[in-house]
Amino acid sequence: MPVPFADLFTGMIIFPMFLLFARLGTAIMVFPAISDPSVNVRVRLLITLGTCFLLLPLLGDTFPTLPNRTADMLLLLFGEMVVGLMLGLGARLMMSAMSVAGELIAFMAGFQSASLFDPSTNTNSGAPAVFLTLCAGVVVLGLDLHHQLILATIESYKLFKPGVMPEVSSIAAVYVEMMTVIMRLGLQLAAPIVVAGLLTNVMFGVLNRLVPQLQIFFISVPVTITVSVVLLAAGLGTMLQLWATATQDRLTLFQVEEGAD
C-alpha cells in the first residue's frame, strides 16, 4: 500500500525541520546579542527559520523517523531543547564575566549609585557593567561568533544524536567549570582598576592620617573616579580582546568539557 503524500512529507520535511528548529531555536534564544530583548521576537524567529531551511539538507540523514507515541515525541523534543540550551548557554555565561568585571569596577570607582538599565538582563546594573556588556555584544557580532554558533549546531549532531540525552553529571560538571572560568576572567578583566583603586584608597588613607583636618572624602571621590575612567578607557581594547579570546575558546558548554578533559 503506498504511503500517503501527507505522511511522507511530514516524515521527511516537517518532522526533521521541527527537531532542528527546537535545537537551533533554543540556542538562539539564549545566545548573546541575538537574544537581547531589544531584538524583535519576529526577527529572531525569521533568523531561526531561515537558518533551519539552510541546514536541513545538510543534516537530513541524522534525524530519526517520526515516532508513533506522543510521549516519545515529547521526550525527543525535550532532548533537543536541552542540547540547544547547552549550545547557546556557553556564550551567554561568558557575558556574565563582563558583568562581574563591571560590578567590580563600579565598586572600586565609586559608581555603586550610578545604576543604568541593562537591556541584556532587563535589570538595573552599574554603569561600567552595562557599558562592558554592550561592548561585548558588539564584539560578538563583529567577530561573527554567531556564525560559529551555526557551525557548533552542525557539530553537535555528531556528539548528540536526536533522542540521545546528555548525561546530567556531565552537564553539572561543565556548569561548575564554567562558573570558575567566569569568576576568574571577571577578576582578570577588572584587575588593573581594582589594584589602582586599592592603591588610591591606601594613599588617601595615609594622607588622612597625616592631615586629619583635610576633607578627604571630597578629594578622594573625584580622583578615584578619574583614575578608574582613565584606566578603563586605556585598557578597554585589551579587555575586549581578552574576553573575545576566552569566549571563542568556550563558545558552547561542549568546548568547556573538552578543555576540562
Image: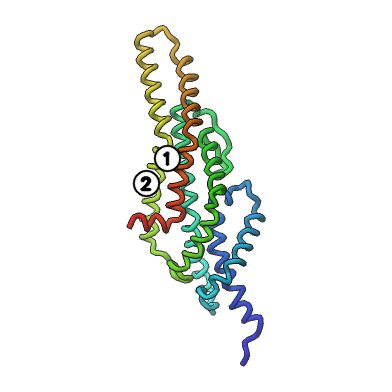
Return the residue found at the far bottom. 1
Q: Residues within 10 Å of mark 2 (few under 14, many from 20)?
A: few
Q: Residue at x 40, y 42 (%)?
A: 185
Q: Which quadrant is home to the N terminus?
A: bottom right
Find residue 180 and name its label: 2
Of residues 231 and 36, the one nearer the viewer is 231
Q: Amino acid at mark 2?
A: Thr
Q: Residue at x 53, y 45 (%)?
A: 139
Vertical position of residue 167 compared to residue 223: above or below: below
Residue 225's place in the image compared with 208, above or below, is below
Mark 2 to mark 1: distance in Å? Answer: 10 Å
How is colour applied across the structure in the image?
Answer: rainbow
Q: Is residue 75 visible?
A: yes
Q: Which mark is residue 186?
A: 1
Quadrant hosting residue 210: top left
Looking at the rendering, which quadrant does residue 50 occupy? bottom right
Quadrant hosting residue 184: top left
Horizontal side, residue 119 vs residue 178: left or right: right
Left or right: where 70 falls relative to 245 = right
Looking at the figure, which quarter contains the C terminus? bottom left
Which element is circle 1 on?
helix
The spot of residue 169 in percent (x, y) is: 36, 60
Q: Earlier in the sequence, mark 2 or mark 1?
A: 2
Is residue 172 among what the camera can see?
no
Q: Where 164 sits versus 229, above or below? A: below
Q: Residue at x 61, y 73 (%)?
A: 14
Residue 28 x, y percent position in the rendering: 56, 56
Q: Secondary structure at mark 2?
A: helix
The kind of residue on which mark 1 rests is Gly
Counting from the top left corner in percent of width and height, residue 56 is at: 58, 70
